Image (cartoon, rainbow, N blue to C red):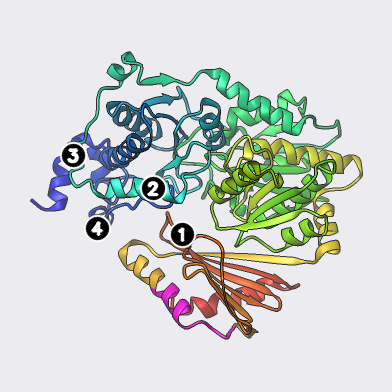
Amino acid sequence: MSVRELWESNLENSLITEAAYSATSEALKEDGYVGALAFGTAGIRGKIGLGPNRLNKFTVQKVATGLAQYLNEVKQDATVVIAYDTRHFSPEFCDVIACVLGSYGVKTYIFDRYHTTPELSFCVRHLQTDAGVMITASHNPPEYNGIKIYGPDGGQLALEGAAKVSGYIDKINDVFHLQTEDKQTLIDKGLIEIVDNQVIEAYKKEVLNLVHSIPASDLKVVFTSLHGTSVPIVPEMLDALNFTQYEVVKEQAIPDANFSSVKSANPEDHDAFDMAIDYARKSNADLLIATDPDADRMGIVAHVDGEFHYFNGNQIGALLLNYRIQSTQNVSNRAAVKSIVTSELGRIIAEQNQVKMFDVLTGFKFIAEKIASFEANHDYNYIFGYEESYGFMAGPFVRDKDAVQIVPLIIKYASELKNEGKTIVDAMNEIYAQYGKYQEKLFSHTFEGQAGKAKIDAIMANYRNYQPTEIAGLKVIKTDDYEAQTSTSADGVTPIDLPKANVLKFYFEEGWVALRPSGTEPKIKLYVSLITEDIDAIAEKMNAAIFNDK
């Protein structure tokens, strides 16, 4: 029996309906049987469907089995908390994972409805569980879902633990006969328990303590959850802070796994704000805010004199970092953390205000690890961490990016500015005037299937093995290869004191570019960060030079 025949014979028990499978194109069906979904640095993400290269009941059980075996290795009577978002099969996958874990004696806490990723991170810490699981594909298209695994610190599972879980998963060959018990049986045994609502109330209290208050002003806000998990919790936070001058985009406040009202439920995409902009035009709102489906990322648009100003993740990060520096003047030994593909503007702002800036690999787990080291060594006090991909976190009561705490925080900042007769745009321009006009551009190239993966690998190998001396007319003065952990310049080769990562970074006098394949999607990203007045033209030229044979 072929792989396809074997899987199709188990279609009835896969959670995938026969109607959905029949409606799938032949090419997409076949791709489901080519290779298998790989467990990345802390999880797995892929399209929903039938086959080892898709998310379904059997592949989810496989991941859960690997996690259960890992937990039984490292801890007797281990516990886990699971949360899920509004995507297709998220609640079903939650039950599948809980039943597998429970059958291995791992007590599991689950929710009775969807919740945000930062709430999951908080619950791990609050309940002191040994791991957490978030079922989400973040801002991916609706046909995707995923599983993110968290360690006991509330950050995504550390590299060593992730490698061990991956090892257990890889040893599983027969996915159709894995150990699992009935949900009700496990509830009766006390191995599955619903999370008490007081845990979420404790999270809300931490958010309120962080923001403290929002000053009265005539600031008007439009907020959209893009059909995700930030409603009702974000409006609840704003109400608790006595900020009432906000409007929720009602059409997008309804959980919808198809994200029907948007092309992409991603606040990085300008189109995601289209409906919010319609609201803002009618109400003359000053600030528009959007969160992605699992509410770990946040984007903003400012409405000033009839014009809408979109902010990228680097700009939002710079604004928030600057605000946190202003707000924490009484804190000693302050530190902030950013990723290696985030603009150097943050470093300049930090250093000129006596705040130590640390660079870490992409992924908020590395920011979480830095915070843990600060706490263990008592050497720095964390005030802010961020990534250019619209992920921010000020209060370390969670250990992942957290839009739920950042939405009221940036509203507080905007309200204070409004009372000074200023806007977020004014604040950004003041930062540029004081610290330099760093400009950024991001290109994301998708190459589907096994052929796409080979193409991405070939691009990285070419630039790694034949390091360029110039790109689009700009002279390369230094190359950082994070996989080789080396930095090469005219002064020689020096080591990079960070874990290995498939990232290349080329420096110029004017700034840098970086190449980074995604660990969870068939994508490769080109980051461009330069001090220039014409970022679009030079970035397009660089993109064409690197991907000229796309």
Q: Is residue 394 left or right of residue 514?
A: right
Marks 1/2: CA–CA distance: 12 Å
**Is the residue under label 1 in contact with that under label 4 (CB below 8 Å)?**
no
Tell me the residue that label 3 is attached to. Answer: 176
The image shows residue 118, relative to residue 107, as above or below, that is: below
Residue 310 in view (yes/no):
no
Q: Residue at x 56, y 63 (%)?
A: 497
Tell me the residue that label 4 is attached to. Answer: 34
Specify the principal SS of the magenta part. helix
Which three-letter amino acid code belongs to the residue tagged 1?
Answer: Ser
Tell me the residue that label 1 is attached to. Answer: 518
**Is the residue under label 2 in contact with that under label 1 (CB below 8 Å)?**
no
Q: Is residue 104 left or right of residue 499?
A: left
| Sequence-wise first label, 3 or 1 | 3
Q: Is residue 460 magenta?
A: yes
| Sequence-wise first label, 4 or 3 | 4
**Quadrant of the rendered image containing residue 214:** top right
